[in-house]
Amino acid sequence: MKFGKRLKQQIEETFPTWRDQFLCYKELKKLIKLISSALPIAAEPTKYGKAEAEFVYMLNNKIDKFNTFYMEQEEDFIIRHKELQQRIKRVMDKWSSNGSRTEYNDEMAKIRKDVVDFHGEMVLLENYSNINFTGLAKILKKYDKRTGGLLRLPFIQKVLKQPFFTTDLVSNLVKECENTIDEVLFPIEEDKEETKEQKGAIMVAREPVKGIFRNTVAALLTMEEIRRVSSTKDHFSLPPLNLSHSHLIHSFQLNSPIPIL
Amino acid sequence: MEARPALSIQRSGASQLGSLGVSGGLSSSLSIPSTHLEGTYQKLPDIQQVPSERELTTRPQAHATRVPTNNGVVGHIFSSSSGFSSDLHYSSVLPNEKHSRNSPFISQSLADTASLPLSQSSSSLLPQPTIPSCCNKENSGSWCTDPDFLDFPVSTPVQSGQVENIQRSEDFSKQNDWQEWADQLITCDDALTSNWNELLVDNVTNLEPKMACQVAKPCTTMPAQNQQLPSPSVESLRVVNPSSSANNAPAKPRMRWTPELHEAFVEAVNQLGGSERATPKGVLKLMKVDGLTIYHVKSHLQKYRTARYRPESSEGSSEKKLTSMEEISSLDLKTGMGITEALRLQMEVQKRLHEQLEIQRNLQLRIEEQGRYLQMMFEKQKSGLDKLKVSSSNPENPAATSDATKEAPTKSELESSQRDHLDSGTGTVNNAKSMLERSSREMGGEDMATEAGDLEKTKARVSETSPEQAAKRSRIEE
């Protein structure tokens, strides 16, 4: 039940458009309950076979959904990545050589913000992929446990190859982003004098950022929670998460409507 | 001529097929002198052949655009059957799971009845011999065995037959209309088989390849896509199995874009004068990538345009803009700093999450890999033991159980050792190595108590290192 709760929290924290793209863990659990109570495996093997097929069918549906969503996002990211790089090039060519330092800084500030946000979104997509995979693994484990089936191992092997779990591409984009940020964007002359007006503008302009930031924090904490000691630890469970600065991250949870305890 | 209408009912998925009443109308129109029919059918293979050949190389979308041209030629039957073939591509799933119960029957009877004309087609005289041959080949490939048509078949022996049937039924059904049709089919099963026999006996040999081709055409495209799946064509194009369609979107087999592909796309667009002026067709032609269809290009172009013309606004789109004032007040912590500080902080957190996700993902991969490996070993041992059982009786049982229970601790030992390696890398690597050696030795051994003890120790170690490392890291970073 713990994972279900965490998953729900994660879903609530996530972007509105992503909300129904996650695994419907609870529903699948209910289905397992139905199957296990209604059909003891020994009694009616054919019916059991059908029930298992239905379960598999539902899972496949979900996987299709994940794949579609994931690839859609991936495509967007590829496009945006290219655009950002071009923007950076343009701004650098245009203004780094001339004077007008302030304009350059402004543009770069905007780009910087956009790149960081972009990075954040990609990481959150990876998180999406991972959480759904974990959910699938858990639900399969439950299924095998409850019904005595042998569904888990072969099914998971298939899942591992699915597009939504093969996140290498996004991962590479993330790394490229990090490199870009480290090398190009952040070594800047700190504008020490930030007036109050600027800060005010920051506050308003940063609304979208907050969504991503908050989301990321939530994702990290959820991961930590999920990997704490679970009731059914076996050789397929993940070890506890080793998260440094976790006290700091916890502090970001101030005033969040759904505190993660 | 009962056979023909029955056949058309089978083949088509349009709503009118809910009742067999259609057959009445059809049979009357079809009781035209057979010579006339033969004439029309002979025309058809010509038209059909071109699309079917091309389908071997292109995506099903192309198929959809060409098939309707046949409607004019023959009319009723073939329009509906073309509807079927397009349904086959563009749909993937039964909307209700309730229906899936009936579906095994559907696919069973379909498979039975379908195989009959297809096998016959090879022997019949045909104006275009290539079509039946390809139909036949594809028939055997995709209808009988269908090994990797869908990526998800569960290979457990008990359910394999049923699972396959379910999957086949996924192919053939699209909407609830199919369900009604299916019900009909189940009840008319006997009637149909007798009709099939009639059909075969009848001397309308030209009909068979036609039907066969209509049926097999979906098959031709499927294996083509299967071939595309494992071996990506030019520029690492990865084409996803068409059965995984978008949410109720008609006809969009998902394509996986890559940066290289996107580069080619951008170049083509630039050559054509920019994103506004470029047309999907032009871009498609310029790109010259196998398996890319105009639909893919169209949707990608649309995305590209929106991305370009909102470069200054938040890249992510308005969904990310949280308008509530709570958002602003909730992160007072952040607004205390400057922008760059805040950005840096955000970046740090994101990096952290990314790092952890990577680690977690690798762990998961390894765990599953080991699970599979150990399962294999377990099965090997088991089969070995079964052989022993033939000779002796008693010693096996304790051996078998000890093997089974041994598997668990050793597996987790291996994993813990790997976790140590991944998480810390600060000296527990040696421990990990020694543990690996020990566990491999103990695979042959029988001492479970010590293994269980070791398991606890390693898990404790993993969680112990965490606070230590956290302390270390915070010291270093400060």
Image (cartoon, coloured by chain):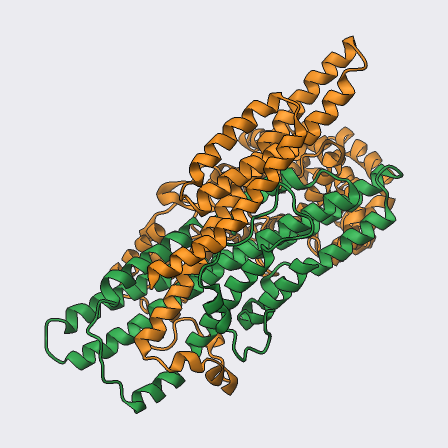
Can residue B120 be seen here?
A: no
**Quadrant that contains the N terminus of chain B:** top right
Measuring 58% from the left and 60% from the top, which residue is drawn there?
A: A225
Residue A231 percent coordinates (x, y) = 69, 52
Query: Between B179 and B343, which is closer to the camera in this rendering?
Result: B343
Measuring 75% from the left and 30% from the top, which residue is drawn there?
A: B200
The tint of chain A in the picture is green
User: Would residue A76 appear left or right of B407 to someone viewing this image?
Assistant: left
Can residue B407 be seen here?
A: yes
Measuring 57% from the left and 56% from the top, which residue is drawn there?
A: A131
Numbered-mark total: 0
User: Would residue A93 appear left or right of B439 to someone viewing this image?
Assistant: left
Measuring 79% from the left and 44% from the top, which residue is drawn there?
A: A147
The single residue placed furthest to the top in the displayed view is: B391
Q: Is residue A110 above or below residue A135?
A: below
User: Would residue A64 appear left or right of B167 to someone viewing this image?
Assistant: left
Q: Is residue B36 above or below residue A165?
A: above
Query: Between B220 and B459, which is closer to the camera in this rendering?
Result: B459
The single residue placed furthest to the right in the displayed view is: A43
**Quadrant that contains the C terminus of chain B:** bottom left
Residue B217 percent coordinates (x, y) = 59, 41
Residue B138 percent coordinates (x, y) = 59, 33
Q: Is residue B234 above or below residue B65?
A: above
Query: Between B175 and A181, which is closer to the camera in this rendering?
Result: A181
The tint of chain B in the picture is orange
User: Would residue B245 appear left or right of A196 to someone viewing this image?
Assistant: right
Residue B251 percent coordinates (x, y) = 56, 56
**For residue A62, which quarter of the picture?**
bottom right
The single residue placed furthest to the bottom in the displayed view is: A197
Query: Between A141 and B164, which is closer to the camera in this rendering?
Result: A141
